[in-house]
Image (tube, grey):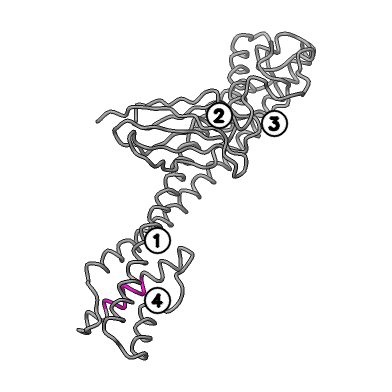
């Protein structure tokens, strides 16, 4: 039975591409009599090593970007809550002082609270900076309307934290895209190498020779006719048939799952055992895990952790599956 349905290398998943490449390299080593033209063997071997390196790097960058996204969201929530408290504090001070409308309006304008709350991150940062600068000026002037400095020092910290998180996320995104572009170019090169090897084998042995199987290719008589989805895969809204967690030597968690036919993507959440609420790890994992290397969650503290994977069809939730893992101290 062939490992692959056909010889359309361009439609292989990443895992399938790596399997074909490895089988082809091994076939070349086991059959020196084939005598591929030129330096095809060396180029195939070099591609295998380079593509695997890029894929591992891309997976790491992808994990870093998702972690940066989660941290940026955390900073945004923290600043949003602090800004709401600051608005309440400022407006309470104005009301308690029973200021005349002109003075009250001037203070609201100076603090930047005369309008509605900003909806975007840039607006939140701008509002935070304006509040901090205004209160510091009032403190320096000895104004009776100055508010607690510790409160605004914390507001300044949260404002800077969100700005730094946004910049760090942009860098992580750029690094992922850069590696992704290199991986795409290397993948194209690998597809061409596989095509050259296939054509050479067919020229020597014919398109239905069993030797093709040893090189990760399919004899003509064994090419699969497209039909229904693989019946072994569960159909949405069912959960994945397999969902496993493993603790890697570097302290990160590797998440492995099987595909779900009809799902558009997967939702991954986690919580410490005993907690009520789940926290988002990633919303957008591919429904077919062969599209990426195993997902790595790099931010995990010691304890007993529960993870759940939910197949999604757009915004519609499928049935969840839960796995538990123990992360020891040290």
> Distance of mark 1 from mark 2, alpha carbons?
39 Å
Q: Which mark is residue 99?
A: none
How far from the left and from the top, in percent, is residue 6? 73, 21
Q: Nearer the viewer, mark 1 or mark 2?
A: 2
User: What is the crowding at mark 1: few (fewer than 14 residues within 10 Å), some, or many (at least 20)?
Assistant: some
Q: Quadrant of the N terminus?
A: top right
Choose the circle earlier in sequence order: 4 or 2: 4
Query: Within 10 angstroms of label 4, few (less than 14), some, or many (20 or more) residues?
Result: many
Q: Nearer the viewer, mark 2 or mark 3?
A: 2
Magenta segment, which residues?
Answer: 129-136
Taking the image as shown, residue 116 lies to the left or right of residue 300, namely right
Residue 21 appearing in the image: yes
Numbered disc 2: secondary structure: loop
Q: Which residue is label 4 attached to?
A: 113
Q: Residue at x 60, y 42 (%)?
A: 316
Q: Earlier in the sequence, mark 1 or mark 4?
A: 4
Mark 1 or mark 2: whose residue is earlier in sequence:
1
CA gap, disc 1 and disc 4: 20 Å
Which residue position holds label 2? Answer: 239
Which of the two discs, 2 and 3, labels the residue nearer the N terminus?
Answer: 3
Q: Are marks 1 and 3 in contact (CB under 8 Å)?
A: no
């Amino acid at each position: 039975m062939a490992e692959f349905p056909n010889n359309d290398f361009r439609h292989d998943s990443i895992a399938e591409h790596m399997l074909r490449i490895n089988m082809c390299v091994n076939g070349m080593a086991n059959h020196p009599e084939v005598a591929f033209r030129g330096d095809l063997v060396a180029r195939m071997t070099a591609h295998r090593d380079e593509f695997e390196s890029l894929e591992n790097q891309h997976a790491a960058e992808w994990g870093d970007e998702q972690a940066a996204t989660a941290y940026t969201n955390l900073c945004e929530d923290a600043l949003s809550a602090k800004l709401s408290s600051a608005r309440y504090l400022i407006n309470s001070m104005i009301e308690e002082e029973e200021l005349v409308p002109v003075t009250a309006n001037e203070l609201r304008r100076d603090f930047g609270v005369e309008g509605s709350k900003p909806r975007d991150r840039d607006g939140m940062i701008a509002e935070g900076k304006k509040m901090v600068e205004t209160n510091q000026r009032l403190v320096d002037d000895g104004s009776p309307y100055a508010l607690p400095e510790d409160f605004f020092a914390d507001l300044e910290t949260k404002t800077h934290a969100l700005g730094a998180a946004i910049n760090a996320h942009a860098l992580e995104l750029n690094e992922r895209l850069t590696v992704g572009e290199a991986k795409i170019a290397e993948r194209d090169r690998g597809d061409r190498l596989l095509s050259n090897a296939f054509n050479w084998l067919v020229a020597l042995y014919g398109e239905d020779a069993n030797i093709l199987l040893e090189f990760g290719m399919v004899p003509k008589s064994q090419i699969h006719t497209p039909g229904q989805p693989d019946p072994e895969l569960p159909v949405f809204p069912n959960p994945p048939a397999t969902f496993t967690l493993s603790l890697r030597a570097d302290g990160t968690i590797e998440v492995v799952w099987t595909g779900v036919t009809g799902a558009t993507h997967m939702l991954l959440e986690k919580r410490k055992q005993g907690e009520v609420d789940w926290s988002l790890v990633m919303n957008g994992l591919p429904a077919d895990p062969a599209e990426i290397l195993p997902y790595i969650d790099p931010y995990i503290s010691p304890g007993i952790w529960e993870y759940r994977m939910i197949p999604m069809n757009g915004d519609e939730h499928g049935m969840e599956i839960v796995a538990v893992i123990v992360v020891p101290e040290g």
